[in-house]
Image (spheres, grey):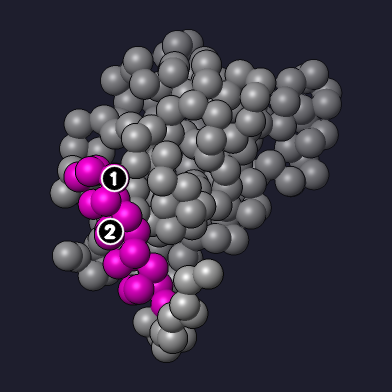
């Protein structure tokens, strides 16, 4: 049994990131400098080192996302859990807001009337928001598919997509759509992800603006 380590409450996060760095080094993994704080925060929130191998970034993805946030970009999530996990104070300082339409009664009603998913209607609502929007999808692959369909129809092109839905049905396929697109993205390849991962990525992007390394 390992000895219990005494760490002051205010130092727990710092020590956690030190441990992550040490374990990545032991595994012979060196993360690209720009992507490192994002991938490390995903590992921090999940305790899963597989993300070091499966996180995928489009060219200059972190820089692109942070520039959007500096311009006051809003974030649209597909769950209220992800919305709750995003640091809204940090986002609001940059002029952005977090939206989640999935649980809205009128969205549910419209989806039922049209016989489509709530994710479809939610993405349509998000496409109508003013200003730049970052999509942070951690649960519903149908949200990613709906976004892609809007692109294919020439109705809307997202400026940035964080695609980390978790699950088994259409999850891998939905992510691959954007891996093969020209939309800037941060995507975790495979089945893993979740609302907590989506929120962690958003926060890593925000914290890099607040306190650059």
Q: Nearer the viewer, residue 16 or 109?
A: 16
Residue depicted at x 44% and y 86%: 6
Q: Nearer the viewer, residue 91 or 24?
A: 24
- Where's residue 86, x and y in %? 49, 60
Identify the residue position indicated by label 2 in the image.
Answer: 21
For marks 2 and 1, the one nearer the N-term is 2
Q: Is residue 24 magenta?
A: yes
- Where's residue 58, x and y in %? 26, 30
Residue depicted at x 27% and y 59%: 22
Crowding at label 2, few (<14), some or many (≥20) Cα neighbours within 10 Å? some
Label 1 element class: loop
Distance of label 2 from label 1 (alpha carbons) = 10 Å
Q: Is residue 27 magenta?
A: yes
Q: Quadrant of residue 84?
A: bottom right
Identify the residue position indicated by label 1 in the image.
Answer: 27
Q: Main secondary structure of the magenta part?
A: helix
The numbered dot on residue 117 is: none
Looking at the image, residue 168 lies above or below residue 29: above
- On the rendered image, what quadrant is the C terminus found in? bottom left
Q: Which residues are magenta?
A: 12-30
Residue depicted at x 34% and y 35%: 53
Residue depicted at x 64% and y 46%: 79
Looking at the image, residue 123 lies above or below residue 206: above
The single residue placed furthest to the front in the displayed view is 1
Looking at the image, residue 38 lies above or below residue 56: below
């Amino acid at each position: 049994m390992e000895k219990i380590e005494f760490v002051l409450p205010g130092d727990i996060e710092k020590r956690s990131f030190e441990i992550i760095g040490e374990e990545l080094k032991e595994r012979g993994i060196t993360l690209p400098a720009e992507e490192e704080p994002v991938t490390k925060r995903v590992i921090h929130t999940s305790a899963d080192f597989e993300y070091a191998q499966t996180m995928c970034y489009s060219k200059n993805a972190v820089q692109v996302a942070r520039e959007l946030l500096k311009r006051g970009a809003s974030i649209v999530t597909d769950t209220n859990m992800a919305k709750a996990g995003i640091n809204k104070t940090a986002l609001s300082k940059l002029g952005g807001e977090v939206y989640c339409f999935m649980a809205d009664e009128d969205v549910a009603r419209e989806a039922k009337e049209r016989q489509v998913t709530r994710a479809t209607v939610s993405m349509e609502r998000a496409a109508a928001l003013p200003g730049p929007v970052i999509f942070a999808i951690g649960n519903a692959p149908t949200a990613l598919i709906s976004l892609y369909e809007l692109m294919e129809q020439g109705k809307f092109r997202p400026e940035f997509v964080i695609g980390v839905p978790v699950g088994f049905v259409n999850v891998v396929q939905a992510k691959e759509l954007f891996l093969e697109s020209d939309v800037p993205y941060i995507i975790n390849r495979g089945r893993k992800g979740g609302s907590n991962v989506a929120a962690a990525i958003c926060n890593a992007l925000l914290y890099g603006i607040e306190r650059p390394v």
